[in-house]
Structures are given as structure tokens and as C-alpha cells.
Amino acid sequence: MADANTRPMLQVAGLRAWYGETLALHRIDLEVREGEVVCLLGRNGAGKTTTLRAIVGLLGRREGQIQLQGHATEGLPPEAIAKLGVAYCPEERGIFASLTTEENLLLPPVLHPGGLSVAEIYQLFPNLQQRRKSPGTRLSGGEQQMLAIARILRTGAKLLLLDEPTEGLAPVIVEKIGQTIRLLRQRGFTVLMVEQNFRFASALADRFYVIEEGQVAGHFRRDELDTQRAEVEALLGL
Amino acid sequence: MDSFFGIPWAALIGQLMVGLINGSFYALMSLGLSIIFGLLHVVNFAHGAQYMLGAFVAWGLLEYLGIGYWPALLIAPLVVAAFGLAFERLLLRRLYALDHVYALLLTFGVALLMEGGFRLQFGVSGQPYPNPLSGGLDVGVTFLPLYRVWVILAALAVCLGTWFFIEKTKLGAYLRAANENTPLVRTFGINVPRMLMLTYGLGVGLAGLSGVMAAPIYQVSPLMGSNLIIVVFAVVVIGGMGSILGSIVTGFGLGAIEGLTKLLYPDGAGVVIFVVMILVLAVRPHGLFGRAH
């Protein structure tokens, strides 16, 4: 687990954000340190996905501060924020139908050194190599999720934002994704993920933020989960 | 055998040739429109005027500077593309967030301004442009003018080159991906707004190239674009809005159909493309090669 000596990868302070005219995030404060796996928990519509989208610059209107490795992202377009070393895997996976599996994988340009090589990615996900000529959307749901994660590992981004990586997948695939995230932590990646599957997340993440109605309603370390389980479950409505 | 079901071979090949010449321009023009629509979701009504601009730049290069057809084939499309880049950067870009109809109105307005300006300066009668490739090929049953053969082959090569660029290259993959999900592609660090600008420049440059190639065949006149653009929009609708391959196949195919109709039923030649459009839309509302959005 990361301690106070590691550098902050991401600092979010007093974040407010709007979808059109609607205020979606009231106040989000959170921090992710280098090498950590941090999970955002909360009910549907609480603002977890919106928080990730705000970090990568996909919301038109926002206030408050977001810093990536100390760089403020205020006013930067998404393509400039990407160059600060963050990559985003959306909930709907965003696999391109008009691109083959391999074209999907190779689409994001390498922006920094230190990403995985294509050979390493194919070793990690052999299915993607077997099906590299198939259109990306012909893959199974699990393969598409792996492709969506795999393609942001090449780019050299050190902070990965994963939105519900296990949603709708079979247990054996969920297990594979858990292994992958552990491996990524070993490789020095930092992960901020949104997850509805609390059992999956509680075995994986170092720290948890509970988001409710666009605000941070609670914050726990993994070793606090047992002693504070009642409070966590109350917040999540489990 | 000197006839085919009672039609002399010479007439058949001659009309097919005329059809394919028109088809070359339909294909090049609808290709540019498709690329622009596919990525920018802009119906570029200025496409005909930009074609006219290409022809006039070629004509002006020859008239005022003595620069001939072959250099103009490179210079004029670049001039038209530069015009397109500036137009996108300064005006068109501001409208992407609004309903598509605003961009359509802007490009339509620009087309009217351009055509009006050229009419004021040059009048409506056409300016002749000399044929850079005189002579022809004797293929036995008939005589094929060399310049027309060149136009068909060049148009085919440019169409296939553009198709290859979009379907088979890395940059083309960016375009296809941005077409599907622009925000996500931007989060990969790809500068999509700049890509949109260059795409508009490419599409408009193709219109300029068509204009130069058309100059020796049709005359160079301010209204040459608006005469062509109506048919080209029908071609785009038949092929399927935004489909690259659809534009190419439909462009050449409809040119050939139109040419043969002139031979078989001359009165129908003016409307045959629109009849095909009605039939296709009745069966496939998204066009022959189009996908539902």
C-alpha cells in the first residue's frame, strides 16, 4: 500500500461539474498516490463516472482544481490532459466497430516511455492476438473489456481510470481482470476505478471513496473495512 | 459483330465513355462530401463552389501567369484546400456544437457568395481551357480521346488512394475512430479538432482537383459547380452518406447508367439518377452502402 512518502498522482479539490445545466458534482475532494489502487464506490447516478470524465477533460463546465502529477488541468482540452499521463477506459468500453481488434489496440499513440509492449499485451491477453483481424465489436464482452484496458497500457500513461471494468462479465473474466489490475500495480501503474462489485473491489483496492449525490460521503482504507463494515454497507445501501 | 443487341459498338463505347467521365466527377466530388460528412457531420454545400474555384484557379494560372495544366493540377487543389482550412478554422468550427443545419446554411451561404462574386467578375458565359492531352487511342471500333482516358484513370487512382488512406493507414484509423467516438479519441491524446480541419481541407482539395480536371472538358464558368452539385448530392444519398466505398462505386456506376440511358432512352437521361435515388431510398433508406446511425 502506498504511504505518505509517495508522490500524489492525482489531486482533486473542491470539484464541481455540470452536465448541461444540471449540477452533477457538488464537491469532490480526493487524492490518489503513485502506485495506489483507489476505488470509487456509490449508487448509480452518484457521480462516480462524472468524476472520471471530469478528470480527463470531457465535461464542458467545471470548477475547482484537478492536478495530475502537480500539473493543473484547468482549461486544457482532453488531448492535452492525456499528455500529462492519464488514460481512461470508459464504462461502455468504447471499442470502435470500424477498426479491427489490432487497430483498436494500436490506436492510442504512445505518449511516454514505460508502457507495455504489444508483445507483453498479447502475452497478457492471448485472445486478443488470436482475434487481431476481427472487427473490434465482434469480440465477446469479456474480450472487449480486455481490449479496452489493453489499449491504454501501451501509451505510457501511469494513471489509469477504469470505469466499471467488471460490469456484466462472467466470474472467470472478472477474476482475470482482477489479476490484471494486480499485475498493473506490480508494474508501477496507478489505478483509479469505479466499481459496483463491492466484493471484487474490496479484495483489490487500497483505499475507497464513497460518492453520494456528487459529494464524497466517506473514505476508508482496506484495513478499516472490517471494523467499519456496518458504516460502509449503510453508505452503499447494501 | 459490329453491334450489341442492335446498338452499334462505337456508340455504346462512346456513351459509356461519356458516362464514365461524368462518373469520375461524381465519384471524386461525392468522395469529398462523404469524408467531410463522415467526420465533421457537415453537409458541405460549398462543395460545388469549391470545385468551381479549382477550375478558376487553374484557368487564372494559365491566363495571368502562363502556368499550364500539369502544375495547376497540383497548385489549384492546394489553393482550394488552403481556402478550406482557413474557412474551417475561422468560421465552420464555431458551429459544430450547434444543430447540423447551421453548418449547412453557412456553407450554402458561402457557395452563393463565391458564385455571385465570380459571376460579377467573369459573367455567366464559360471561359475555354485548352486540352492538355490532344490525340486519342484507336481501339478498333471507336476512337477514345486521350484526355478523357486520363481523367477516368486519374479519378480512379485518386479515389482508390483516398480509400486506402482512410481504410488501411494509421491516420485513417484515427479518422474512423473519431467518426465513431470523438471524445474518447481525444482522451488518447489525439488532437481531433486539428484532424477535423485537415479532413475538411482534404475533402475540399478533392473538389478543387475535380475542378481542374473538369476545366478542359466542360468550360470554366461560375455556375459549373451548382449544375454538378445537385446530381452529386443524389449520388451521395444513393451510395450512403459518409460511405467512402459507396461514393466511389456509386459515382462511377451512376455515370455509366446515365451515359447508357442517353443512348437507349435519351429523354430519360436527365432524370435517371433521381429515379434510381427514389428506388434505392424506397428499399434501403440509408443508401446502398450506408449504415444506420
Image: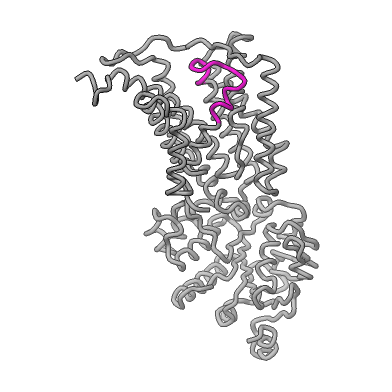
Find the magenta span and give its range.
B213-229
Q: In which quarter of the image is residue B124?
A: top right
In the rendered structure, does residue B105 fall within the stretch colored magenta? no
Task: Check the image and report above or below for B78 versus B240.
Answer: above
Examine the image and state in which quarter residue B44 appears.
top right
Q: Residue furthest left?
A: B1
Q: Where is residue A102 in the image (x, y as percent from the top left)?
A: 44, 53
Q: In this view, does A113 lie to the left or right of B292?
A: right
Instruction: Indicate whether A66 appears above or below A214.
Output: above
Q: Nearer the viewer, residue B48 or B165?
A: B48
Q: Is residue B167 above or below residue B255?
A: below
Q: Residue B64 versus residue A103: which sits nearer the camera?
A: B64
Residue B265 image-quadrant placement? top left
Q: How is the image coloured?
A: one colour
Quick check: can you spot residue B96?
yes
| Residue furthest to the front | B267
Residue at figure coordinates x 50%, y 41% from the top left = B237
Quadrant where the N terminus of chain B is found in the figure: top left
Residue B208, how many percent across, how many down? 57, 26
Can the viewer see residue B164 in this picture? Answer: no
| Relative horizontal placement of residue B144, taking residue A120 as reference (left or right) | left
Could you tell whether B5 is left or right of A214 in the image?
A: left
